[in-house]
Amino acid sequence: MIQKRPMLEPQALKKLADLCAKGEHCSGEMLEKMRKWGLSEDAQARIMEKLTTMKYIDDARYTEFFVHDKIRYNRWGRRKIEQALWQKRVDNSISSPVLDAVEDEEYLEVLRPLLASKYPTIKAESDYERSMKLIKFAMGRGFTIDLIRKCIDERVVEADDSIDFVDDGEDD
């Protein structure tokens, strides 16, 4: 079996700079790549310093884009985004303020149509069972229980508003 030689520091720097020029990446992703390439910790630190100084890597900027994209395109809630950022080793001191800046209404704009499209596909014998299945679905997408409850309660209110009361003439 042929053993690969570890990548040299200048090669790694060029490869990572090219990668960062094409799209946003966080420091955790870059460190993981360098570890797989067999670079020493000293070389990793030097490369990270250069990439950060040259503004190729900025975890705060990365987090802003990541959060926005996951809400808009993947239709994720806060919990799932937090978990994904944790897996990418983005520090809580960076991710928490970005997530706190997102208004509940932004999550609700994503959650309402998500639940509305899921609602008719749920097979349930009671409203309670249907609600529990909707809650489980939305929690799997990372939404918080308070936002889920708000949407489900709104749906009930919408249904109540559409009831047609027939005036039987007795109250006149």
Image: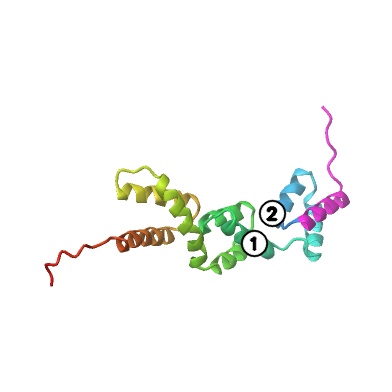
Q: Does the magenta portion include 32?
A: no
The residue indicated by pointer 1 is 63
Most foreground residue, 27 or 111: 111
Classed neighbour count for the residue bearing mark 2: other residues with Cα under 10 Å, few (<14), some (14–19), many (≥20): some
To which residue does mark 2 refer?
A: 28
Nearer-the-camera pick, 117 or 51: 117
Instruction: Give the residue drawn at x 56%, y 53%.
Output: 83
Callout 2 secondary element: helix
Secondary structure mostly seen in the magenta stretch: helix
Quote the CA–CA distance across marks 1 and 2.
12 Å
- Start-end of magenta stretch: 1-22
Of the residues shown, which amino acid type is indicated by label 2?
Answer: Gly
5 on left or right of 123 = right
**Whether residue 78 is situated above or below residue 130 in the rendered picture:** below
Foreground mark, 1 or 2, reads 1
Residue shown at 39% from the left, 62% from the top = 150
Q: Quadrant of residue 61?
A: bottom right
**Amino acid type at mark 1:** Thr
1 or 2: tag closer to the N-terminus = 2
Q: Position of residue 97 (x, y in %)?
A: 58, 68
